[in-house]
Image: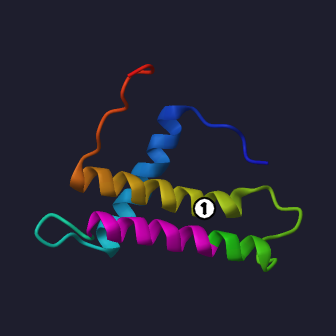
Amino acid sequence: MPKPMTRPEVYEVIDSERAYQDAKYPAVNGTSASPEGFLLVIEELSAQARAAVTQGKLPPLGDGSEIMEHVRKIGATAVRAMEQYGAPRRRPVGY
């Protein structure tokens, strides 16, 4: 199993994936997908991860890093969506 990471380390990983996404899928007029499009991309990435698991495309006794590559892509895609469209802050509990 991969070692746990600190939040700053996780953000570095997300930043590296975001740089890759920006290079591979440049934004046009400030956006690269609609909000709905981002959700569809996240759904597709999740489906690819699910297929890798259910079809045995991951090593049966792997260290988990293969599946975490999918999680990295999903996390960075969600970040890109929020960068382009903003996101509401979480409301305090009880409101």
Q: Amino acid at mark 1?
A: Glu
Quadrant in the rendering for residue 52: bottom right
Dominant secondary structure (helix, strand or loop) of the stretch shown in magenta: helix
User: For the residue labelled by badge 1, is the local secondary structure a helix, a strand or a loop?
Assistant: helix
Q: Residue furthest front?
A: 95
In screen coordinates, is 61 left or right of 46? right
Is 27 located above or below residue 85 in the figure?
below
Is 94 located above or below residue 56 in the figure?
above
Residue plotted at (43% across, 71% down):
41
**Which residue in the structure is indicated by mark 1?**
69
Residue 21: image x %, image y %?
A: 36, 66
- Residue stretch rendered in magenta on the structure: 34-48
Residue plotted at (51% across, 33% down):
7
The answer to whether residue 36 is magenta is yes
How many marks do you count on the picture? 1
In screen coordinates, is 78 left or right of 13? left
Quarter of the image containing the C terminus?
Answer: top left
Q: Nearer the viewer, residue 88 or 74?
A: 88
Q: Residue furthest right?
A: 61
Residue plotted at (89% across, 62% down):
61
Question: Callout 1 environment at 10 Å: few (<14), some (14 to 19), or many (20+)?
Answer: few
Residue plotted at (45% across, 44% down):
12
Residue 54: image x %, image y %?
A: 78, 74
The answer to whether residue 46 is magenta is yes
Q: Nearer the viewer, residue 88 or 12?
A: 88
Quadrant in the rendering for residue 36: bottom left
Residue 51: image x %, image y %?
A: 69, 77
Residue 63: image x %, image y %?
A: 80, 56
Q: Residue furthest left?
A: 29
In screen coordinates, is 61 left or right of 50? right
